[in-house]
Image (tube, rainbow, N blue to C red):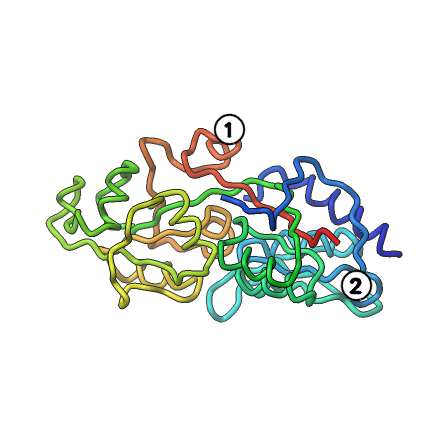
């Protein structure tokens, strides 16, 4: 199989995933997928694919489709679930399907260590600057939908918040759950590290020009970390993306919050009625 055929299959596979779940001149927008000839194919002619943690199952689906092998969900020791190829009876080397995370994937693309990335956000200012310094233009194509969601402990009586309430919680103006219809307890507003996909979505969707409360002890480094923390903390609130919460980190002690009266689910994301519906992007270098 040559790289032209492989690349076409990659984009066709992406188009079959309608619901996965301030740019500068360093990014070009492509509204419709086009055939891209990848100059540095990986092992056996496969393009090297990287991406965010939440898109790893999409990357696995592409490879399983290309090689005509089944995929199955596997639970790892960290309680994350991943879609993995079943290679029983498969002859030959299978290309790796691991994703290094959003920021690392961008760096790998800019440094020519991968050919295509699948990510739940467009590049940050820092990533655009790095691309520009390297003379790289990134081409961004939306290929699927996901959503930015808020999570709380199952025992929290609050079932939904308005955008304004979320903003006031994360600026530190609202500090107790009884200020938003809950119990008389302190709010613990968990955050993510600055370059994570979740944190960039938080800043662009929710906070905009508002300054987040300085709470270094509540900053969590791993995507699974808010689920661990809030499952044990009835006073906590955090955020992630819908596909990851529903499929990769299912946790009976966690519940999703409605935002402005609308719950995130496949229907409200597909219709974009849920306020924080977001695109999932396939991104390549323009050259």
Q: Which residue is drawn at the image coordinates 70% and 36% (left, top)? A: 32
Q: Which residue is mark 1?
A: 271
Between disc 1 and disc 2, whose residue precedes? 2
Describe the element under mark 1 as helix, strand or loop: loop
Mark 2 is surrounded, within 10 Å at the Cα level, by few (under 14), some (14 to 19) or many (20 or more) other residues, namely: some
1 and 2 marks in contact (CB < 8 Å): no
104 versus 264 height, above or below:
below
Numbered disc in front, either 1 or 2: 2
222 versus 234 height, above or below:
below
Q: Which residue is mark 2?
A: 40
| Separation of residues labelled 1 and 2 (CA atoms) | 38 Å
Q: Quadrant of residue 128?
A: bottom right
Mark 1 is surrounded, within 10 Å at the Cα level, by few (under 14), some (14 to 19) or many (20 or more) other residues, namely: few
User: As rendered, which of 177 and 199 lies closer to the eye?
Assistant: 199
Q: Quadrant of residue 253?
A: bottom left
Q: Which residue is drawn at the image coordinates 60% and 59% (left, top)? A: 131
Q: Quadrant of residue 130?
A: bottom right
Describe the element under mark 2 as helix, strand or loop: loop
Quarter holding the C terminus is bottom right
Residue 156 relative to residue 176: left or right: right
Instruction: Say whether residue 153 is visible.
Output: no
Residue 203: numbered disc: none
Residue at the far right: name it: 1
Task: Tell me where residue 201 appears, x and y as whole percent.
Answer: 43, 49
């Amino acid at each position: 199989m040559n790289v032209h055929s492989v690349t076409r299959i990659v984009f066709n596979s992406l188009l079959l995933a309608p619901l996965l779940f301030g740019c500068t001149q360093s990014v070009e927008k492509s509204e419709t997928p086009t055939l891209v000839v990848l100059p540095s194919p990986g092992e056996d002619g496969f393009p090297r694919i990287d991406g965010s943690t939440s898109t790893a199952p999409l990357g696995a689906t592409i490879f399983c489709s290309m090689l005509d092998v089944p995929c199955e969900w596997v639970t790892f020791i960290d309680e994350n679930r991943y879609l993995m190829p079943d290679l029983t009876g498969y002859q030959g080397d299978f290309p790796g399907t691991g994703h290094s995370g959003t920021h690392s994937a961008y760096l790998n693309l800019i440094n020519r260590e991968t050919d295509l990335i699948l990510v739940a956000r467009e590049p940050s200012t820092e990533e655009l600057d790095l691309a520009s310094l390297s003379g790289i233009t990134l081409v961004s194509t939306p290929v699927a939908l996901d959503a930015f969601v808020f999570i709380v402990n199952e025992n929290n009586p609050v079932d939904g918040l308005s955008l304004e309430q979320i903003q006031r919680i994360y600026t530190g103006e609202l500090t107790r759950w009884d200020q938003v219809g809950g119990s008389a307890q302190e709010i613990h507003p968990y955050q993510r590290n600055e370059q994570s996909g979740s944190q960039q979505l938080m800043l662009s969707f929710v906070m905009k020009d508002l300054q987040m409360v300085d709470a270094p002890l509540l900053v969590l480094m791993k995507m699974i970390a808010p689920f661990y923390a809030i499952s044990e903390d009835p006073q906590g609130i955090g955020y992630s993306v819908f596909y990851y919460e529903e499929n990769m980190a299912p946790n009976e002690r966690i519940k999703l919050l409605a935002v402005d009266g609308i719950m995130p689910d496949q229907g409200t994301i597909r219709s974009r009625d849920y306020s924080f519906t977001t695109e999932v992007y396939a991104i390549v270098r323009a050259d």
